[in-house]
Image: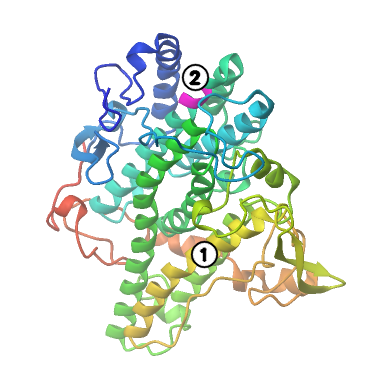
Amino acid sequence: MNIMNVDYSTKIPNNVDLASDRQVLKALEGWHPGYIDWWNDMGPEGFQQSLVYLRTAYSVDPRGWAKFDYVKMPDYRWGVLLAPQEDNRTIPFGEHYGEPAWQEVPGEYRAMLRRLIVIQGDTEPASVEQQRHLGKTAPSLYDMRNLFQVNVEEGRHLWAMVYLLQKYFGRDGREEADDLLRRRSGDADSPRMLGAFNEATPDWLSFFMFTYFTDRDGKMQLHSLAQSGFDPLSRTCRFMLTEEAHHMFVGETGISRIVQRTCEAMRDAGISDPTDIAKVRALGVIDLPTIQKKLNLHYTLSLDLFGSEVSTNAANAFNAGIKGRYHETQIEDDHRLTSATYPVLKLVDGVIKRVDEPALTALNMRLRDDYSQDCVKGLLRWNKVITTAGYDFQLALPHVAFHRAIGEFKGVHATPEGLLIDGATWARRKDDWLPSTDDGDFIASLMQPVSDPGAYAPWIAAPKVGIDNKPGDFEYVKIET
């Protein structure tokens, strides 16, 4: 079959010839009703029967791979899509560097691979669960449609991981696939596996921060797994990255539009001091200091997703050829890291210092550094909006020692600038740096839905261009009445 194009002749769209793989097709068809039950229970609440202008993949050719049309979300054609197989691909790192990439799971790495796939798979439905109520307070039909596009694609990314589990891991894989539908974000008894995916997403500023910062962590993890010597995982992640780009676009442009609207409102009202929070909030927009607090929260929660800076698990996955570095094949070194070092920030005798660690065990630190550099790009664009409006205020990433629950700075109290402080000072000042209950209440008060085509809530600017080049008043979601 043509690996580029997607076969829609089975219940499960795919480009992996499921029609001739009856055992896996039967397993996936058996899993499908449970998935639909999960989607109806935990997907976007109140809009399951709305027609949404969504893109669906018909190919994995990056030059043209999706078509747009109205669809009810439970009828969305979720499927299994892998990037094309590269001829004669070899393992690009680790102890098996240069050997042919694996088409089947190597027995000695079975447990390690399964766990990585399960963790990645667990994040996908978690974010849908976190965002399920946001449709009710969408600031426009454009934003509502983007939310739902993110949601259905996170659902497809779950399918991508479930396919790998069902095809390559037998009974264990089937049990893990069922568990992915059993856990729930924030549930006391059966929570999602990673902390950031058990946090609430109570408002649209949180959603935009999540899609910018947390989905960007997903991008970094997918890039690392796309280097994998296990070729089906590599190909799966390569196509997931194509879809993931839109999710980060939603976050970056959403925050940019909030910043723009705030600056416009301040300028129109003659407010010269962007830190005069009461005056700015009286205009019905989100003040820049509160945007900074939300940024502080979501960036630090996302940093924790990288795990401990020094990690033998990361070293073992690299040595095994299972999980590489960001853009592994573009790095100029031996791709084995037998004697290389990498600087790691640590707390040494009460002082934050850089300490050279073996590069193999510092892989999480390196990936997190790559992530932080990638995050800066959006901040430059947001700050340009503020500067262009004539305001002396800059959004900034907080220090990596600030507000950490995992790694070298777990339990350490530090300011966003990286100054170490005692517990009493932290307790007194934390509401200056992280969103307080009052901040949350104010943002919640702005979350009034706007559902007229072409209209936008007064706290966010309209986008520069529409999705699929549609006009500004296009009806992206046809809400049932």
What stretch of residues is rendered in magenta? 163-167
Q: Main secondary structure of the magenta part?
A: helix
Q: Nearer the viewer, residue 110 or 50?
A: 110
Give the Cα separation between the discs numbered 1 and 2: 41 Å
Which secondary structure, mark 2? helix
Q: Quadrant of the N terminus?
A: top left
Residue 334: quadrant of the picture: bottom right
Residue that label 2 marks: 167
Q: In the figure, is residue 72 to the left or right of 133?
A: left
Measuring from the top left, give residue 255's x and y in whole percent.
Answer: 38, 65
Measuring from the top left, give residue 257's x and y in whole percent.
Answer: 32, 67
Which secondary structure, mark 1? helix
Measuring from the top left, give residue 220's x and y in whole percent.
Answer: 51, 52
Is residue 300 visible in the rendered image? The answer is no
Q: Give the residue at x 34% y 47%.
A: 147
Q: In the figure, is residue 253 to the left or right of 318?
A: left
Measuring from the top left, give residue 146's x and y in whole percent.
Answer: 30, 49
Mark 1: which amino acid?
A: Lys
Q: Give the residue at x 48% y 35%.
A: 125
Residue that label 1 marks: 294
Q: Give the residue at x 39% y 47%.
A: 244
Mark 2: which amino acid?
A: Lys
Q: Nearer the viewer, residue 48 or 79?
A: 79
Task: Verify whether residue 164 appears in magenta.
Answer: yes
Is residue 310 visible in the rendered image? The answer is yes
Position of residue 282 relative to residue 154, above or below, is below
Q: Counting residues from the N terminus, which is met first, the one under dot 1 or under dot 2?
A: 2
